[in-house]
Image (cartoon, rainbow, N blue to C red):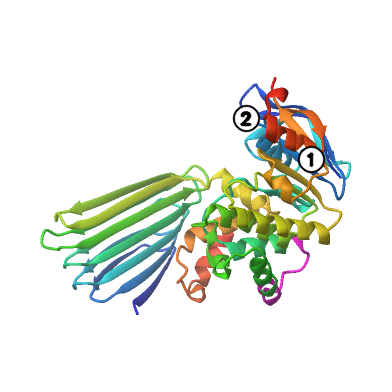
């Protein structure tokens, strides 16, 4: 289970908390969505869970299976099974996509990943996310369109097989067809890995039509204001966030 | 098909002079050395790609001068250095196009990564004496961005291996480099 317990966090060297005593429990197999207007702390939450260098936890805790990960480095959190699909994946010139994914797989597994097996598996996964296989040999996210970057995040997810997935605005920059491909791959992954916990961060309910959440939370001013089911997302789509702003 | 030249300076300082008369790619690797390089493009319609990759531990300099002596000559110069300690590393990079050399392309891209508090300097100079020239330069001195490390580590890659990936990507800055020819340099990257 992924648990966020009374979590408050701020940008380093500032005095103002962006997250304010936020609590959330995501049990195995559950899909939670966090919605909210711009600037309420949605992406901050995802980055703080992943241990981003810009943020500092001022109180509270983050736990995986009742064990605190708050003081772990980002790579150690990932090794515990956390995976953040980023809103704007980083471009790194010179580091090839294949070398990056293979290094990550080698760190995860005790034995070095066999090159033939790796190539065979990844080409199948690339086909499933509709990414051209030559993108494997290009620099990481370099020259990729917005949609290709998001598909590349899903490709990494499929390779690394995490237990706790955070999707930070995975729908932004995706056309309808790409959104369907991305959602289909995530849904297939969840079918094959039923114990996976998912946190979807989004402005809009559109993605939730494709990946059905068990719970929808509305975030305002760094804490959860209300929790409901898909009907809450539909209400927000109709009425906006006005009722939940402080 | 271009002519390929591989050079490895291992703890030594050297002078090089090339008189180029055909399409040429020069891969110059340097471990802790200074270099003076003069390249003359002496035939019309030829292309030069020059990749200088350098790991630096002491005070060192790269002086490189590319002279476009003929029409329609094209140079792309990429200088990448990693300054490991707190020493001086200086790149003087000069592209020169003569008045009677028409339609030349003269570009340079210079980058130095300071691992600690190295005192690095890049002096890009373009001496262009002709109106019909395409010429650019770029220079960057700094560290690897924190967001690079965060992204790599967010996939479970340790900080040490994340740095290694970044260093290799930075110092092996062309897909066409034959890694079998630079094994000493590859070993040195792992020692940084």
Image position, residue B73 (x, y; %): 22, 67
Q: Is residue A176 above or below residue A204?
A: below
Dots 1 and 2 on the same chain: yes
Q: Is residue A17 left or right of residue A173?
A: right
Nearer-the-camera pick, B25 or A42: A42
Q: Residue furthest left?
A: B100
Task: Point out the stretch of residues depicted in magenta.
Answer: A107-119
- Residue A107 shows up from this direction: no
* Secondary structure type for disc 1: helix
* N-term-proximal mark, 1 vs 2: 2
Which label number is shown at residue A39?
A: 2
Image position, residue A61 (x, y; %): 81, 34
Please identify, in this view, whether the residue under mark 1 or under mark 2 is nearer the observer: 1
Q: Residue furthest top?
A: A246
Nearer-the-camera pick, A219 or A229: A229
Q: Quadrant of residue B2?
A: bottom left
Q: Report the quarter where the N terminus of chain A lies.
A: top right
Q: Is residue B148 magenta?
A: no
Residue at left offset 44%, top offset 52%: B58
Label 1 chain ID:
A
Label 2 chain ID:
A
């Amino acid at each position: 289970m992924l648990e966020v317990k009374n979590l408050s966090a701020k940008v380093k060297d500032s005095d103002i908390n962006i997250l304010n005593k936020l609590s959330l429990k995501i049990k195995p197999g559950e899909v939670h969505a966090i919605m909210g207007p711009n600037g309420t702390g949605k992406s901050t939450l995802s980055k703080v869970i992943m241990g981003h260098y810009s943020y500092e936890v001022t109180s509270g805790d983050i736990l995986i299976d009742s064990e605190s990960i708050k003081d772990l480095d980002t790579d150690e959190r990932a090794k515990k099974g956390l995976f953040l699909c980023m809103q704007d994946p980083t471009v790194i010139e010179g580091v090839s996509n294949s070398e990056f994914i293979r290094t990550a797989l080698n760190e995860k597994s005790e034995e070095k990943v066999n090159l033939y097996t790796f190539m065979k598996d990844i080409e199948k996964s690339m086909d499933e996310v509709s990414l051209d296989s030559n993108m494997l040999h290009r620099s990481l996210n370099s020259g990729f369109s917005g949609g290709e970057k998001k598909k590349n995040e899903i490709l990494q997810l499929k390779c690394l097989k995490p237990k706790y997935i955070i999707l930070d605005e995975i729908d932004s920059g995706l056309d309808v067809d790409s959104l369907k491909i991305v959602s289909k791959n995530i849904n297939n992954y969840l079918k094959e890995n039923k114990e996976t916990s998912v946190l979807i961060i989004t402005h809009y309910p559109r993605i939730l039509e494709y990946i059905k959440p068990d719970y929808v939370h509305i975030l305002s001013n760094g804490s959860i204001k209300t929790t409901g089911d898909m009907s809450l997302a539909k209400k927000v789509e109709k009425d906006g966030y006005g009722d939940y702003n402080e | 098909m271009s002519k390929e030249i591989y050079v490895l300076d291992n703890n030594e300082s050297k002078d090089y002079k090339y008189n180029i008369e055909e399409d040429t790619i020069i891969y110059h690797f340097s471990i802790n050395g200074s270099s003076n390089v003069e390249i003359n493009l002496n035939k019309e319609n030829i292309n030069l790609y020059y990749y200088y990759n350098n790991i630096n531990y002491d005070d060192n300099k790269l002086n490189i001068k590319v002279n476009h002596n003929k029409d329609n000559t094209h140079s792309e110069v990429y200088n990448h250095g990693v300054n490991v300690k707190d020493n001086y590393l200086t790149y003087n990079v000069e592209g020169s196009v003569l008045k009677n050399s028409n339609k030349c392309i003269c570009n340079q891209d210079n980058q130095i990564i300071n691992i600690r508090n190295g005192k690095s300097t890049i002096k890009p100079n373009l001496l262009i004496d002709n109106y019909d020239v395409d010429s650019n330069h770029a220079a960057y001195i700094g560290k690897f961005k924190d967001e690079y490390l965060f992204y790599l580590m967010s996939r479970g890659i340790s900080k040490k291996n994340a740095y290694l990936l970044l260093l290799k990507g930075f110092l092996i800055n062309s897909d066409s480099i034959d890694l079998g020819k630079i094994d000493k340099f590859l070993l040195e990257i792992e020692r940084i």
